[in-house]
Image: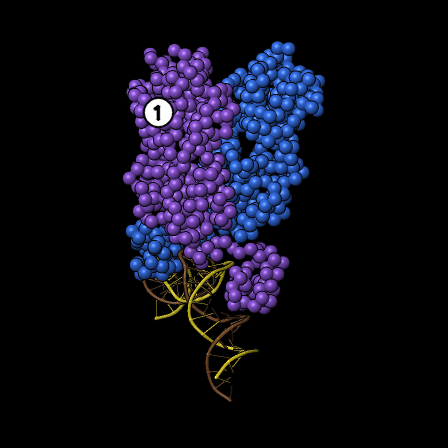
Chain colours: A purple, B blue, C brown, D yellow
Amino acid sequence: MQPTIRDIAKKVNRSITTVSRALHDYDDVSPETKELVRQAAKEMGYVANKQAQLLRQQHTDTIGFILPTFGPRFSDPFFSEFLAGIGNAAAEHAYDLLVSTCPPGEHEMDTYERFVQSQRVDGFIIVRTRVDDQRILYLDSQGFPFVAFGRVPGLEHISYIDENSEHGMRLIVDHLVKLGHRRFACIAPSLNMTFATHRMKGLKEGLAAHGIQMRPECVLTGDLTEKGGYERSLELIGLAERPTAIVACNDLMAIGAIRAIQDSGLTVGRDISVTGFDDIPISEYVQPSLTTVSQPIYQIGRSACEMLVDFLNDNGSGRKQILLEPALVVRHSTGIPIS
Amino acid sequence: MQPTIRDIAKKVNRSITTVSRALHDYDDVSPETKELVRQAAKEMGYVANKQAQLLRQQHTDTIGFILPTFGPRFSDPFFSEFLAGIGNAAAEHAYDLLVSTCPPGEHEMDTYERFVQSQRVDGFIIVRTRVDDQRILYLDSQGFPFVAFGRVPGLEHISYIDENSEHGMRLIVDHLVKLGHRRFACIAPSLNMTFATHRMKGLKEGLAAHGIQMRPECVLTGDLTEKGGYERSLELIGLAERPTAIVACNDLMAIGAIRAIQDSGLTVGRDISVTGFDDIPISEYVQPSLTTVSQPIYQIGRSACEMLVDFLNDNGSGRKQILLEPALVVRHSTGIPIS
DNA sequence: AGTATAACCCAAAACGTTTTGGATTTCAAG
DNA sequence: CTTGAAATCCAAAACGTTTTGGGTTATACT
């Protein structure tokens, strides 16, 4: 059984008040008493009961993060890196991280409501914002603290960190156009994710700037997995007027695309160029290595967490919106089109 | 401000005792009162304050999981899938998941001690067991509930779930030998991870069964990342008597190996065959696709969590050791050696 | 001597629950 | 009418902290 503050009090012959205050270094406790208490606490292996402490203090020192898990084979490296970021930042600021998993839709909001109403967490980190994002609408309406990775249209006041996907996509387009590409295709995620809208906007505007337009049958939507990228790419390859460049909206789908092209007997970077987005570590190792746009996912996780912690402590000073500039990473999945 | 049980009591003109008991469906509350209370609770949007509830009940309904994060670019798909497994299982049993991140070594034990002593979690899930695993030694000595993914030598009594890596490796060896391979090399993880010892044992015994022995310079240790696999493979390729098969102890390193072979101007599956271990989703999509051993990571996460929950509820009946049989997945990174 | 100040200490309340150990009422049986 | 049991209810204690609102003593100053 863990010793309590009461046990220490008994041992050192002081009141529990004094013990508590000694441990918290209040200055109405004599140095000798403080030393005495600290000594005893250490000897007895005392560690404060967090539940009790937090109940009294009326906050939780924990931040919530709900993983939007899609299928059972949920293995997007994006998330483990992001999680590492918030986890480490949280640990540094003595916050705990309460993680829940929940597929988007249906019971998702129940999970959020349960967490805020039962006062289990002080704030949330929201990832992959959506267009009509119920999670954010709800938290915002409740005045519950959160920071989002991703903007959400129509809600400019919320705290977010995001990368400038429009710009990232323009970098990709410029790169491909410079290589000589004119026939573009694209594999987009479902457009209710805001990052998808930004990437598509950047893509279309980038192309428009060069007087290029994608034909409607050339833009398909995939589910962000390799499998999705693979299947959509086969469709694109089968098109009468075959595209020379497939712009995938994330690396995983791009990797699927590479594979589809190879399975069709074509060569990536010659017959068809492929680009990704995210620069997950593996994209350097696939063959050919993937031209993509890098975003510092770990760092974004860290920053998101730190923004939230700042907010919880200072009650909301500090910068609330951050937009990161991405960088193009040219590798070998893109080349001069042969046709 | 969330309403409390006291507010409900006032509203329905009963004591807080009765309200509490009504909400918990005790049978010393009249049906009418129950209905009344429930109605009021719903109207007022009452949700129990979890901190208070748990303080009183002297447990936490949360399980702890500490992610052993190596570098900042921590993006092992293994972990996101495993996490999804425990997360979903925990949610189903109304447990929360407290996740912390901590690089192995140094302060790792502090993190564990803090969690158990501050009574923040009811039990732990431990992943990637090590040979002298301080975490397990500590938890076991404290009688603190946990289940491990991975056995640990000398501690047969602990609750664990593991897959039969020895067998998995023997499947790989048999497959390669049947193809005609005799010159094997291997990229092992640090041998203080128990899964590494099992896999190496399986590998060596499998080879021995065919009268094959690996030369010492042919077994190198990598850090489980693509990068590590790539670098170690370059060394192996540079060897005077070049191996015809590189057995990597996980998929990520295998993917690095594939890349290294290709960068050296050789072809995978002809000049050198490569095998992985884990069957992460991407291994189906690299080129050539990876021959590997599949283990149901998501399911293992689920089971580990369920074992722990069972233990916490029943106080320890039920099966405590599970060993899963892996399956060989033959793809295109292995073939008949040409030499 | 009286009083103000500083230094140190503590009892009790509070946080929001659950549980303990009855108390009261009702009603049927004796 | 008394008794016992069943059906309802509740005051208070408890969980382990932190905070409030003081109290006591010693010292220094007028």
Circle 1 is placed at which residue position? A221
Is residue B37 visible in the rendered image? The answer is yes
Is residue B34 visible in the rendered image? The answer is no
User: What's under tag 1, amino acid-wise?
Assistant: Thr
Which residue shows up at 54% across the image and 67% down it?
A29
Nearest the viewer among A80 and B51 is A80
The image shows residue A125 at horizontal and vertical percentages of: 41, 42
Q: Is residue A102 above or below residue B247?
A: below
Left or right for A332, reference B317? left
Which residue shows up at 49% across the image and 42% down it?
A87
- Residue A218, quarter of the rendered image: top left
Nearest the viewer among B27 and A199 is A199
Question: Which chain contains the residue that carries disc 1?
Answer: A
Secondary structure of the residue carrying tag 1 is strand
Left or right for A238, reference B131? left
The image shows residue B162 at horizontal and vertical percentages of: 58, 33
- Residue B166, quarter of the rendered image: top right
Which residue shows up at 38% across the image and 34% down it?
A164
The image shows residue A267 at horizontal and vertical percentages of: 45, 14
Image quadrant containing the C terminus of chain B: top right
Q: Residues within 10 Å of mark 1 (few under 14, many from 20)?
A: some
The image shows residue B210 at horizontal and vertical percentages of: 68, 17
- Residue A325, quarter of the rendered image: top left
Image quadrant containing the N terminus of chain B: bottom left
Which residue shows up at 59% across the image and 31% down it?
B223
Nearest the viewer among B109 and C3 is C3
Q: How many marks?
A: 1
Q: Is residue C25 above or below residue B321?
A: below
